[in-house]
Image (cartoon, rainbow, N blue to C red):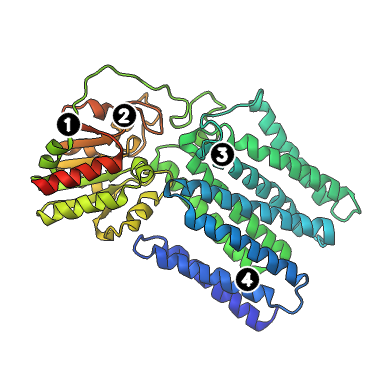
């Protein structure tokens, strides 16, 4: 590797590190993404331009074809479908790393050391799990299949056996790597079993826990990229894969903590008979009366408040009402009302989902308050407006020990003087359980599509 290439790879690694740093803040996230994209572009250009590279034309054609598919897909994806897109792109990454490792083993027989052979087997197993597992998470979030846990007959025994079989064949492939065909046969069997393991691994995960699994599979993909970097003797792949693996692992732990869940509970809850977050919980119907109101009454409540909190959720994203909520907030501020947005870590379907949604409407970053900063504010808030959220404000997570979401940190909107709950219907949230806050005397329900309801509120406030 030439000195110029090494310098370019070092520059790329620095770009990836700065990109992660930028993504730690909504204010700098866009620049972080651009820096990461710049680093990736430099890495691709430098790699393709190396003199010793073979099959340059097919590689360039593949890059162009991938760009033609990926750019429109990323630009046209709906905000509500971003988690599915992340799952799909992540699966492609894991599958690619797995194929590269197999190519090195099958075509070139370059695995001339035990360490390299172990790296190949590891990449084949983990990359395959990431690939098929990501496809299943995509299907669950896209509602191509049920979001409830699916247990194949005898799954409690079949899944471990398939996993042990994949690992055993991987070990056999390493042990016979120097042979003519023995290592190849074992590695192919290992890969097939690992592909099946990815399906069995994710099927039992309930819909509410799928985003956590997406993050975990993302970490798996990073580890496979790092391992394939070792096989290819490419330092940049090792650095990039390690960054993705480490950050993905940390994100997985943070998401599980934000949901009040353990990783083992997310992955193996269905095997033990306990439900994963809400996916098997029975919907509790209630005949209790609720208080509802129209746009004019709620507009008066908001217009004469001193402090208002906006709690966005997935329903806001579905209705694409981010611009309308921004218009309402601007209108209230022009009347001297203090307004802030309270953002739960897992509001929507993934961390940052609401931040990105509100950024589309150019909501000032200073108005966004994360859960830890927002919760102390609710006790002095006159009106908390919940738009499309449910589980992240459900007091059952804090007060009901038997609830499937008990222990999940929530936004304490029930501490506000008044709560306005904007919902399409009385249907429960993603966790599938009833919300006692809906029946609280301080809560007023405003039924309807979020965008339509907010438009009516804007008109009503203007008329005051």
4 and 1 marks in contact (CB < 8 Å): no
Q: Which mark is residue 293?
A: 1
The local crowd at label 2, few if under 14, some if 14 to 19, many if 20 or more residues have their Cα within 10 Å, is few
Q: Quadrant of residue 70?
A: bottom right
> Which residue position is annotated with label 3?
139
Tell me the element at label 1.
loop
3 and 4 marks in contact (CB < 8 Å): no
Tell me the element at label 3.
helix
> Which residue position is annotated with label 4?
44
Quadrant of the frame with the N terminus: bottom right
Tell me the element at label 2.
loop
Choose mark 1 or mark 3, whichever is in front. 1
1 and 2 marks in contact (CB < 8 Å): no
Return the disc, 1 or 2, that comes first in the chain's sequence: 1
Return the disc, 1 or 3, that comes first in the chain's sequence: 3
Return the disc, 4 or 1, that comes first in the chain's sequence: 4
Q: Residue at x 16, y 27 (%)?
A: 441
Distance, label 3 to label 2, CA atoms, is 26 Å
Return the disc, 3 or 2, that comes first in the chain's sequence: 3
1 and 3 marks in contact (CB < 8 Å): no
- Report whether residue 114 is seen: no
Distance, label 4 to label 1, CA atoms, is 58 Å
Q: Which mark is residue 425?
A: 2
Q: Report the residue that reaches farthest toward the top.
A: 287
């Amino acid at each position: 590797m030439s000195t110029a290439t090494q310098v370019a790879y070092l520059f790329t690694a620095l770009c990836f590190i700065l990109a992660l740093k930028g993504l730690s803040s909504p204010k700098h996230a866009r620049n972080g993404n651009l820096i990461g994209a710049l680093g990736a572009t430099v890495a691709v250009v430098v790699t393709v331009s190396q003199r010793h590279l073979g099959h340059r034309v097919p590689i360039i054609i593949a890059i162009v074809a991938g760009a033609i598919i990926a750019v429109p897909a990323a630009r046209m994806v709906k905000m509500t479908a971003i988690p599915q897109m992340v799952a799909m792109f992540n699966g492609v990454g894991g599958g690619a790393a797995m194929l590269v490792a197999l190519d090195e083993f099958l075509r070139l027989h370059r695995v001339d050391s035990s360490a390299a052979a172990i790296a190949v087997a590891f990449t084949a197993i983990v990359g395959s799990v990431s690939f098929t597992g990501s496809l299943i998470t995509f299907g669950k979030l896209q509602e191509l299949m049920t979001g409830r846990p699916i247990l194949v007959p005898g799954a409690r025994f079949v899944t471990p056996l398939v996993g042990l079989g994949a690992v055993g064949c991987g070990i056999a492939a390493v042990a016979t790597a120097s042979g003519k065909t023995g290592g190849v046969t074992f590695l192919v069997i290992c890969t097939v079993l690992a592909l099946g393991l990815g399906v069995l691994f994710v099927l039992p995960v309930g819909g509410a826990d799928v985003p956590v699994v997406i993050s975990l599979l993302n970490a798996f993909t990073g580890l496979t990229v790092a391992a394939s970097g070792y096989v290819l003797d490419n330092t940049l792949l090792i650095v990039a894969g390690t960054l993705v693996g480490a950050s993905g692992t940390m994100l997985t732990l943070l998401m599980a903590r934000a949901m009040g869940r353990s990783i083992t509970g997310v992955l193996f809850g269905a095997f033990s008979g306990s439900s994963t977050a809400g996916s098997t919980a029975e919907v509790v119907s209630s005949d209790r009366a609720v208080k509802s109101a129209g746009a004019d009454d709620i507009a008066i409540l908001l217009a004469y408040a001193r402090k208002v909190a906006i709690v966005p959720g997935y329903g806001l994203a579905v209705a694409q009402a981010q611009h309308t909520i921004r218009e309402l907030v601007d209108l209230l501020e022009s009347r001297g009302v203090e307004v802030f947005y309270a953002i739960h870590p897992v509001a929507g379907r993934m961390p940052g989902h609401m931040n990105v949604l509100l950024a589309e409407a150019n909501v000032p970053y200073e108005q966004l308050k994360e859960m830890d900063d927002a919760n102390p504010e609710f006790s002095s808030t006159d009106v908390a407006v919940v738009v499309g959220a449910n589980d992240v404000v459900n007091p059952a997570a804090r007060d009901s020990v038997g609830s499937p979401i008990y222990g999940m940190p929530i936004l304490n909107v029930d501490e506000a003087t008044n709560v306005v709950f904007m919902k399409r219907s009385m249907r429960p949230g993603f966790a599938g359980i009833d919300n006692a806050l809906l029946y609280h005397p301080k809560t007023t329900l405003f039924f309807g599509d979020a965008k339509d309801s907010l438009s009516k509120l804007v008109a009503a406030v203007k008329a005051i």
